[in-house]
Structures are given as C-alpha cells and as structure tokens.
Image (spheres, rainbow, N blue to C red):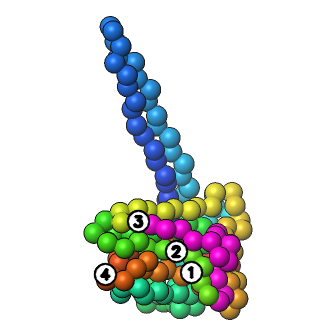
Amino acid sequence: MPLTSDFGITVSGTQTKAGDLSTPSDVLSWRRGVHLESGTTAGKADLRFTDTRTLAASATEDLDLAGVLLDAFGAALTFVRIKGLFISAAAANTNNVVVGAAASNAWATLLNATGTITLRPGASFAAMSGSADATGMAVTAGTGDLLKVANSGAGTSVTYDIVIVGASA
C-alpha cells in the first residue's frame, strides 16, 4: 500500500529592542523539511509506525524495529532503514522519557549503542534523513534493531507519542 510522507522542523521568532525613535527587530524563519514518495530507495519510504504509549513507573520497553511493531492495519513492520523518528513526551508526565541504550541488540545507528536522549515532560525529539539519502538510519535485524524507551523514575507512569517512518529494503 502506497505511503507518502512529509516531515519538517520549523523555528521562527522575532527579537526586538526598544530604541529612542524606533524598535529594531530581527525576524527568523528557518525550516528544514523532507518529502518522501512511496518506495525503498533515496527519497522514498514504505513503512510507518505510530502510537501513543504508556510506561509504568520505572518501566522500560524495547521497540523491535524488525518484525514486531504493527502498522495501523495490523501488518508486521520490518524496517531495514529508518528515514524519520519523532518522539514526544506528554506534558503531563512527572518523570522523563529516556530513549536509547538497549541492553542487547541496540539500534545504534542514531545514538550509538550506549547513547540516550532524555525528554523532559512536554519535550520532543526529531531525526530525519534527507530526501537524497538512500541509506537512512540502518536497522540490522537480530543484532541492531531494539530501540529502548524508559521511564526515568518511580512513582508515576509516563506517556509518549512515537512516529517512525522507514523502508523495508
């Protein structure tokens, strides 16, 4: 089934400083985006996983990128390349969401085997490959396919949204 995807990161803002007769300003409008058509080569993706997930206090989970996650229609997804990863911690969380550093078979292409990203309540993280990149972020089934997500503390659960877009070949 065909998949087209658009991702983007946008930063905008206006900085001003009051002067005697005027208020000078500096306006920033910066955007980077990627459009992917359906397929498995450069500028293409054919798999997408989306979910809102909750982890109990102090809990962790390993998201298996090669054959365990299901798409919106219940089909198993086997990512060979990740083209976009987006994770957002719920603003209502008390604890942080920590991403990365699975104990075994860690998906190390993005964060190395031991790297992590800590998302405080309300924080988000995005990584995307360029449209000319045929490789993306490689997944190696059985040895490099587990994306660990953890609740940083005890006492309360955490909720996070995740979107993964990638290719099956």
Q: Amino acid at mark 4?
A: Thr
Q: Which residue is mark 1?
A: 147
Q: Identify the mark nearer the N-term, 1 or 3.
A: 3
x and y percentages locating residue 155 in the rendered image: 31, 83
CA gap, disc 2 and disc 4: 18 Å
Q: Which residue is mark 4?
A: 156
Q: Which residue is mark 2?
A: 99
Of residue 110 and residue 158, the one placed in the foreground of this image is: 158
Of residue 111 and residue 135, the one placed in the foreground of this image is: 111
Q: Dot 1, how many residues are within 10 Å of its Cα: few (below 14), some (14-19), or many (20+)?
A: many
x and y percentages locating residue 146 in the rendered image: 59, 85
Q: Amino acid at mark 3?
A: Arg
Number of numbered markers? 4
x and y percentages locating residue 48 in the rendered image: 50, 75
Q: Which residue is mark 3?
A: 120
Q: Quadrant of the C terminus?
A: bottom right
Using residue 94 as the reference point, say whether residue 98 is left or right of it.
right
